[in-house]
Amino acid sequence: MAPIRHLWESDPIQYILNWKFPQLMQFNFKTLQPYVAMGMQKTDSLAKEAKEYRQELLTRSPSELTALLEEAKAAEWARYAERLRVEEQQRSFNQPNAALHDFNYWAKISFWTLDEAVAMALERDPRQVSWKHVQSVATVSAFAAQYASQRELVTRAVTMGQLWESTAPSVFLAWANRTNFVFPDKLAQAVTKLGIQIADWKTLYEKANDATKSAQALAAEKHSALMAAMADHSQSLTKLSERYQSLLDQRDELSRLKDGRIESLADKLRELEKAPTVREKSLGTRERESLLKLVIGMAMGFYGYDPKSARALQTKQIADDLERAGIALDVDTVRKYLSEAKDLLPPD
């Protein structure tokens, strides 16, 4: 099937004639004024004029015909646009009584239907304008086309659970703010004036949910760090316990060595106590010094005796150990020999 061509393409001269003499058109197109019956005399006169004009057009150059054709097309579209403007202006939904005026009433109502919300978004009273009023002219009316476009946005928002078939005014206005859906400021002010918060609950929920997830993630991170620190601390305690046990074992070993040496030291001291004068006389100087070195060495090594201390506590501890071993010496005697033995220590 061959494509339908416009008259200005198939017969440009006839197109120009139709524009110049619309009253003589054989068919009335929707872009022209309605046919008006004329008297025969007037018709004959116009027909003669049109015939002469056709002959004139046949003598025009292609460029001149093109210029006339463009002028005719522009004039036709201007008439068409003016006709659409007049028709649009005359439609019921563009009349003064269809405009939205009662903002307070619609602010107080408990919910809006989708059609009501769309009509008010376009500043029309929902009681006068609805989808059923504009649907039939959506292809030729600028307002109806805008209504259809806005209605599509709202319908899809319902499908996605952002709005409902019946939505509270505050929720709808919050959605409109978030999506830049144009809405009359006067209506939003009327809703706010009632003390109703226009809050985007979806966005608030998403922010709160994100904050909760962040807090949970931070808590999990802190918990992991704490558990790791506790594990390290437990290992440290285990090592410390093992070290402490090792020190206890060393102490017990030193205690056993001390007890064995005490017997030897006690025997020597007992001999000195029984016959100090004879012993001192019978012992040579080197032997006495060696014995005193032995005494001071064991006192320092096994009792922690400090030669620089004026009243060393270890003196009594040595005397007590000798008494438990059954070879008692009084504290002063022990202190005496320790004092003599200090003089044999090398200088600091």
Image (cartoon, rainbow, N blue to C red):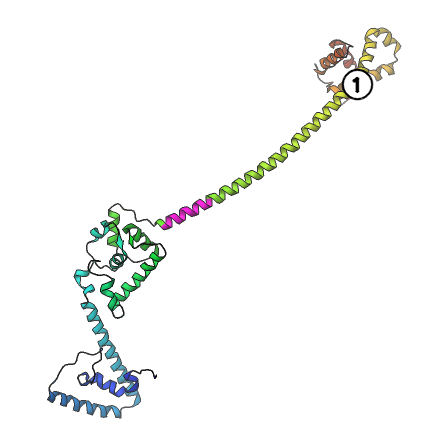
The count of marks equals 1
Q: Is residue 231 left or right of residue 101?
A: right
Label 1: how many Cα within 10 Å (few below 14, some 14–19, many 20+): few
**Amino acid type indicated by mark 1:** Gly
For the point 60% across and 35% down, the residue is: 233
The reply to whether residue 343 is visible in this rendering is no
Does the magenta run of residues contain 248?
no
Quarter-wise, where is residue 267 in the image? Answer: top right
Q: Which residues are magenta?
A: 202-214
Q: Quadrant of the C terminus?
A: top right
Per the image, label 1 sits on a secondary structure element best described as helix
Q: Quadrant of the N terminus?
A: bottom left
In the depicted structure, whether residue 244 falls above or below residue 169: above
In the depicted structure, whether residue 181 falls above or below residue 12: above
Q: Nearer the viewer, residue 123 or 164?
A: 164
Quarter-wise, where is residue 25 in the image? Answer: bottom left
Quarter-wise, where is residue 277 in the image? Answer: top right
Residue 333, percent from left and from top? 76, 9
For the point 65% across and 30% down, the residue is: 241
Q: Is residue 230 left or right of residue 71?
A: right
The secondary structure making up most of the magenta span is: helix
Residue 307, percent from left and from top? 74, 18
Which residue bears the numbered disc 1? 260
In the depicted structure, whether residue 320 falls above or below residue 23: above
The reply to whether residue 144 is visible in this rendering is yes
In the depicted structure, whether residue 41 falls above or below residue 330: below
Residue 123, percent from left and from top? 23, 59
Residue 101, percent from left and from top? 19, 56
